[in-house]
Image: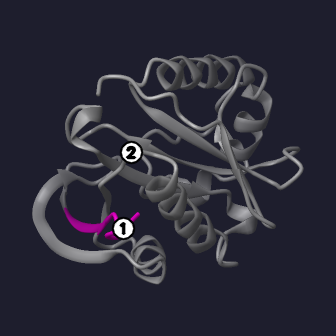
Amino acid sequence: MDYFSAPEERRTDRLLLRSWKPGDGPLLSEAVNCSYEHLKTFMPWAVPHQDVETSEQLVRQFRGRWLLSQDYVVALFSPDGSRALGGCGFHLRHGPLSLGVAEVGMWIRADVAGQGLGTHALQTLIDWGFSEWPWQRLVWKCDAENHASRRCAEKAGLRLEGITHGDQVKVGGTERRDTAWYAALRPSGV
């Protein structure tokens, strides 16, 4: 399988998960900018001020890659779609689509972090991934010192598979960091 017609959205009582689309640039810019201090330690892409034009270009790239089955960057919105609450996705970093393996990751905007939204979003992403997507295995990686990310993975039911030592450079530095690897397999019968 080289192409997958991805489902467009998943809704819960707390979230709308969907592809970023043209016109979402201002929402992405606002969410990233109000969260920079919160994100900068572990997210290498975070910058002090991401302008609307850059954000709009990004959301259009995300949408194009989604439609081409190259990568699936998922936006997290308030249930009515009026506010960006973060981002996540199914990333093809472990081989082609035909392998059925996606890496998931997430960021949550600062003013809603620590309220269980990340765990809810990850549980929703996992359920969606194994029910409507072709994933056989979902992988979650994070800096071993990112305790909030690790807690989120564990609460969502992902299993720690191991720690790779010194495999990455810390964001904004030259020191090496350790990476915690978590994963889940598609339940049998699904």
Name the residue that disc number 1 marks: 189
Is 26 situated left or right of 3 in this image? right
Numbered range of the magenta stretch: 178-190
Colour mapping: one colour
Horizontal and vertical percent position of residue 128: 54, 56
Q: Secondary structure at mark 2?
A: loop
Residue at 75% over, 64% down: 111
Q: Is residue 40 above or below residue 165?
A: above
- Three-letter amino acid code of the residue under disc 1: Gly
Residue 5 on the magenta span: no
Name the residue that disc number 2 marks: 134
Corner quadrant of residue 68 = top left
Corner quadrant of residue 90 = top left
Horizontal and vertical percent position of residue 103: 34, 50
Crowding at dot 2, Cα within 10 Å, few <14 / some 14-19 / many 20+, comes out as some
Corner quadrant of residue 3 = top left
